[in-house]
Amino acid sequence: MAVPDVLTGLPFWLLLTVLTLGAMARGQLVYWIGRTATEQTLRRTRPADGWAARAHRWLSAGHADAGIVVIRRWGLIAIPFSYVTIGLQSMIQAAAGVLRITWWKYTLAQVPGALAWGAIYASFGFFAWTLIGEAARGNPAGAIGLALLAVVLIGGLVLVRRRTDERAEAVQDELADAPERT
């Protein structure tokens, strides 16, 4: 992935600002999907189609559970750190919405993380992706190495997903078997 042409001529400070605001917007989107979907679909309805149905399936399958655990353990500090993780970012942001963390607290907590994400990509992030792409195009050994790396990463993600699904099923089974409190 090379730097998009529209970004190549921008001064560093402007590129940093654009990327940080983009990260903030994405974080807000995921937060509000988690918050709205929790309020509207999990508690009141069972949508059959559209974005609400997809959000309902994603949340009811426990995909935000890991983020909920992280936030409950580490508090709001988990939000900015999520921006420098791979695989937890969306879970933590959706979990913040599911947990109904106050909007202004979430927004203030996400600022340093979005700024760090913007700084990483404005400085060397896009450059690293460009180098990886160039290595894959110009060097057969590099292409094979990247393909093997992709297989390992995808395999790892599949295993993590299976374990997450198994844990979510176990939690749901446990909740279904638990006596109701009155």
Image (tube, rainbow, N blue to C red):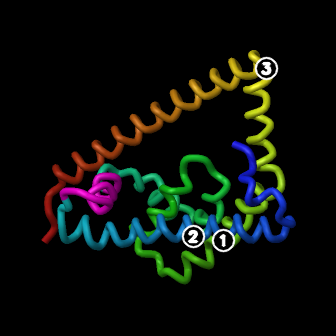
Numbered tag placed on residue 139 in the rendering? 3
Q: Position of residue 23 (x, y in %)?
A: 63, 65
Q: Secondary structure at mark 3?
A: loop
> In the rendered view, does 166 fall on the left or right side of 137?
left
Q: Position of residue 118 (x, y in %)?
A: 73, 62
The kind of residue tagged 1 is Leu
What secondary structure prevails in the magenta region? Answer: helix
The kind of residue tagged 2 is Ala
Q: Position of residue 104 (x, y in %)?
A: 54, 83
| Circle nearer the viewer, 2 or 3 | 3
Q: First in sequence: mark 2 or mark 3?
A: 2
Residues shaded magenta:
48-59
Q: Which residue is mark 1?
A: 21
Question: Which residue is painted at 32% across and 68% down in the image?
Answer: 38
Q: Per the image, is 121 magenta?
A: no
Q: Quadrant of the C terminus?
A: bottom left
User: Dots 2 and 1: beta carbons under 8 Å?
Assistant: yes
Task: Pick the residue in front: 37 or 169.
Answer: 37
Question: Which residue is painted at 67% across and 65% down in the image?
Answer: 113
Question: Which residue is painted at 25% across and 49% down in the image?
Answer: 172
| Circle nearer the viewer, 3 or 1 | 3
